[in-house]
Structure formats: C-alpha cells, structure tokens
Amino acid sequence: MAERLNQNWESRDIFSLGPKFRIDINNPQMGSDGTDVYTMYGVTDNKDVAIAGLTEGGTYKIYNDKSIELVGGSKGTEGGIDIVIAGMNGDITITAMKNGEVRIKGANVMIQADEDVDIKAGRNINLSASNGRILLKSNKADCNALVGNLAEATTGSFVQRVFLGTKVGPDFLISDGIVSGIGNLPNVVANVAGGLF
C-alpha cells in the first residue's frame, strides 16, 4: 500500500497524437513486471488494440488483438539470413493456444541441437517422405512397443514375448495369423530372447 502512495504521477508524460495513437511515458501504475518506462498504444475503428513498450523490469512487450506480421529480406541476398530470433541465456517458447497449430515451412528444414532433441506427442508422431526415404542413423537404435510391424521384426510383438519359452512357438502364432510373421523368424526369436534374458 505504501508503494502505491509513493507513486510519482508528476513524472508521467502522455503524448496523444490524435484519437488512435498515444505514447505513455513513466506510468507509475504497477504491472506484473513493474511500472512502465513507456507504452505505445494504438486502436483501430473496430476497437482492436496494439500495445508495445518497455517495463522497469526490462521486458519489452508487444501485444496485438489481431495478427502480427514479421517480414524481412525483401532486398536481402539469396541464401542470407533474413530474420534472427536469439535467446542469449534462456529458453525460446512458441505456443499456439486453443486449437492452433505451429507450422514451420521451408524448402529445407533443419533442427540442430548440441545435445538432445525430444519430440513428445499426446497421440501420434507421423513421419512421411513422399518422394524419398527416412534414414535413422545412430550408434544405438531401440524400439519399445507392444505391437506393430517394427516391434515384431526386431524385438517381437507383445504376444510373441508372452509366449516366449512356452510350447506355443512363433511358427504357430504366424500360421494362425496371430502375428504377421514379417522379417526373419529365427532372428526375431533370437532378438526376443536376447531382450528378455
């Protein structure tokens, strides 16, 4: 409460350049990141608002009721870098709220990390190379799945692992249509046994 009483309203300046645009300097009202150093405020005839400014906490903010366009490189050199987004000491977060999608599109898309790349999905991960191939290259590649042709061809499906070591052999499971029988049957059995024992 004392902080509110000590607000210096005399240092505040407001430059109004018509009914649609103004610049507010040294607004002493506290926000989530301190008071504002300056705020540029614009409004359209439809009451859509755009705000840009700097807080005393050092945050530069841009808010807009509709879309934000960031375009660069119309006169740049081919193959050059047109837009740079860099986080010097922290994370970079891109979030599409509600049902929005995050789309990255280009002639080529490269994701590079000095350490790990983690891709997590609540449902499916789809990889599609319509006119080429999908290449996985590493020192070690693991498949941990209950069902699917990749699981059956490498470590064996969940059903194959359940019946491993019993009198119900893989040949019966394949002949009865319980598993697909893709791949080399002896290698599948060996892989299943090697993964369990």
Image (tube, rainbow, N blue to C red):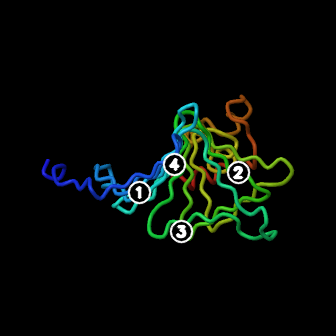
Where on the picture, by quarter, is residue 78?
bottom right
**Three-letter code, disc 3:** Glu
Q: Position of residue 28 (x, y in %)?
A: 28, 53
Q: Residue furthest top?
A: 176
Q: Residues within 10 Å of mark 2 (few under 14, many from 20)?
A: few
Left or right of 50, for residue 182: right
Residue mark closest to the camera, 1 vs 3: 1
Contact check, label 2 and label 3, Cβ < 8 Å: no
- Residue 17, numbered label: 4
Distance from disc 2 to disc 3, alpha carbons, whole Å, reads 37 Å
- Residue 115, numbered label: 3
* 107 relative to 156, above or below: below
Q: Position of residue 185 (x, y in %)?
A: 72, 47
Residue at the image point whose x is 61% and y is 47% from the top: 68
Q: Position of residue 93 (x, y in %)?
A: 50, 54
Left or right of 181, for residue 9: left
Residue at the image point whose x is 72% and y is 35% from the top: 174
Q: Residues within 10 Å of mark 1 (few under 14, many from 20)?
A: many
Q: Position of residue 184 (x, y in %)?
A: 75, 50
Contact check, label 4 and label 3, Cβ < 8 Å: no
- Earlier-in-chain disc, 2 versus 4: 4
Left or right of 161, for residue 110: right
Q: Nearer the viewer, residue 118 or 110?
A: 110
Residue at the image point whose x is 65% and y is 66% from the top: 138
Contact check, label 2 and label 1, Cβ < 8 Å: no
Mark 1 highlights which residue? 38
**Three-letter code, disc 2:** Pro
Q: Is residue 50 visible?
A: no
Mark 2 highlights which residue? 186
